[in-house]
């Protein structure tokens, strides 16, 4: 009977401890640095240079963006795992999830969407906690 009680105490303590990091991770995520990667497939590939030089730089000027990089697919070898189908990509670095949320409402970001969304047929976003 004593072994069973000790076993139950151990399991109970382990179960409670398992939830502690989850709570602290959830609280810390708001301050978690992150990378916001955006890939654009344009209606007309001939618009790539204009979109790269006139449109996407607006995003890098948003207040909460720490670092901004834009580019086109690298001319790497064709392999099954490499996607060269998009035309323009930009990578934005944020100090926190809160900064990225503020970016979503930034007037420049909203102007970019309003002014240039007609140029893309698809956009994909990949957010990475770092």
Image (cartoon, helix red, strand yellow):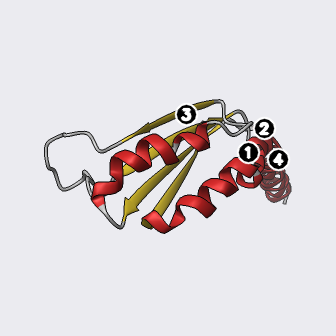
Compared across the picture, whether 34 is left or right of 85 comes to right
Q: Which residue is mark 2?
A: 31
The one nearer the camera, 27 or 77, is 77
Q: Is residue 99 above or below residue 42?
A: above
| Closer to the eye: label 1 or 3 | 3
| Label of residue 20 in the image | 4
The one nearer the camera, 28 or 48, is 48
Dot 4 crowding, Cα within 10 Å, few <14, some 14–19, many 20+: few
Spatial CA distance of label 4 from label 2 is: 18 Å
Q: Where does the image place residue 5, in percent across and percent down from the top left?
A: 86, 57
Q: Earlier in the sequence, mark 4 or mark 2?
A: 4
What residue do we see at 84% from left, 46% from top?
27
Say whether residue 129 is visible.
no
| Closer to the eye: label 3 or 4 | 3
Q: Are marks 1 and 3 in contact (CB under 8 Å)?
A: no
Dot 2 crowding, Cα within 10 Å, few <14, some 14–19, many 20+: some
| Closer to the eye: label 1 or 4 | 1
Q: Earlier in the sequence, mark 2 or mark 1?
A: 2
| Label of residue 97 in the image | 1
Tell me the SS state at disc 2. helix
Tell me the SS state at disc 1. helix
| Label of residue 84 in the image | none
Tell me the SS state at disc 3. strand
Q: Which residue is mark 3?
A: 68
Compared across the picture, whether 123 is left or right of 84 comes to right
Spatial CA distance of label 1 from label 4 is: 21 Å
């Amino acid at each position: 009977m004593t072994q069973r009680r000790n076993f139950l105490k151990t399991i109970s303590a382990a179960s409670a401890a398992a939830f502690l990091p989850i709570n602290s991770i959830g609280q810390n995520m708001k301050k978690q640095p992150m990378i916001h990667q955006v890939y654009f497939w344009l209606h007309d590939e001939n618009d790539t240079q204009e979109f790269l030089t006139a449109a996407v730089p607006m995003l890098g000027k948003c207040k909460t963006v720490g670092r901004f990089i834009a580019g086109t697919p690298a001319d790497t070898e064709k392999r099954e795992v490499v996607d060269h189908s998009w035309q323009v990509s930009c990578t934005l670095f944020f100090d926190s999830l809160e900064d990225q949320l503020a970016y979503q409402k930034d007037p420049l970001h909203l102007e970019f969407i309003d002014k240039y969304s007609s140029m893309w047929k698809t956009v994909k976003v990949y957010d990475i906690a770092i």
